[in-house]
Image: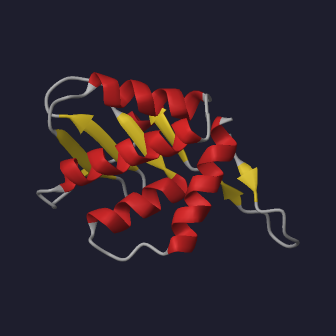
């Protein structure tokens, strides 16, 4: 699903911030393994926090369900991979489900992985977009 920016001038397609469990199109992307040795732990804490925010907002859409299902199914250490387009793929070591993180959500997670500051406005925008897409 794509949204446009709604401003005059050229139309720019923007994918909504989202979590997608076992995304078929993730297989078509080139992935580079995250170099930060703490990436799996950072991603797990981030995703658990997002699940809690979605629970507090009573979100029941597909992204909320996908995130919940992924976290419930993965107790092993997580592996984090990045695509050139900014997407992040999170998976357990070995076999198991994958979670594609895209849009503003991936931007914020990337900042956490890179130990860069996350602006409150970016965090708020990500949460608002995610909430709208999961209600």
Q: Quadrant of the C terminus?
A: top right
Which residue is located at x 33 percent, y 48 percent?
30
Q: Is residue 73 above or below residue 46?
A: above
The image shows residue 3 at horizontal and vertical percentages of: 74, 50
Q: Is residue 7 left or right of residue 88?
A: right
Judged from this view, the residue extending furthest toward the left is 37
Residue 90 seen by the camera = yes
Which residue is located at x 26 percent, y 36 percent?
91
The image shows residue 105 at horizontal and vertical percentages of: 49, 54
The image shows residue 51 at horizontal and vertical percentages of: 45, 39
Judged from this view, the residue extending furthest toward the right is 8
The color scheme shown is: secondary structure
**Towards the viewer: 23 or 60:** 60
Q: Is residue 120 left or right of residue 68?
A: right
Q: Quadrant of the N terminus?
A: top right
Q: Is residue 126 left or right of residue 47?
A: right
Which residue is located at x 40 percent, y 24 percent?
69
Q: Is residue 57 above or below residue 84?
A: above
Residue 85 seen by the camera = no
**Towards the viewer: 92 or 130:** 130
For the image, the number of numbered tags is 0
Q: Is residue 66 above or below residue 47?
A: above
Q: Is residue 21 above or below residue 114?
A: above
The image shows residue 73 at horizontal and vertical percentages of: 29, 22
Which residue is located at x 70 percent, y 56 percent?
13
In which quadrant of the rendered view does residue 97 lie? top left
């Amino acid at each position: 699903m794509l949204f446009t920016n709604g401003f005059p001038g050229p139309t720019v397609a923007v994918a909504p911030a989202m979590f997608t469990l076992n995304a078929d199109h993730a297989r078509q992307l080139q992935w580079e393994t995250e170099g930060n040795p703490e990436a799996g732990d950072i991603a797990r804490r981030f995703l658990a926090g997002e699940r809690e925010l979605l629970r507090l907002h009573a979100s029941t859409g597909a992204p909320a369900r996908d995130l919940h299902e992924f976290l419930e199914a993965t107790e092993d250490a997580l592996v984090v991979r990045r695509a050139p387009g900014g997407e992040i793929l999170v998976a357990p070591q070995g076999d198991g489900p994958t979670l594609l993180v895209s849009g503003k959500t991936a931007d914020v997670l990337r900042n956490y992985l890179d130990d860069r500051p996350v602006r409150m406005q970016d965090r708020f925008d990500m949460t608002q977009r995610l909430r709208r897409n999961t209600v």
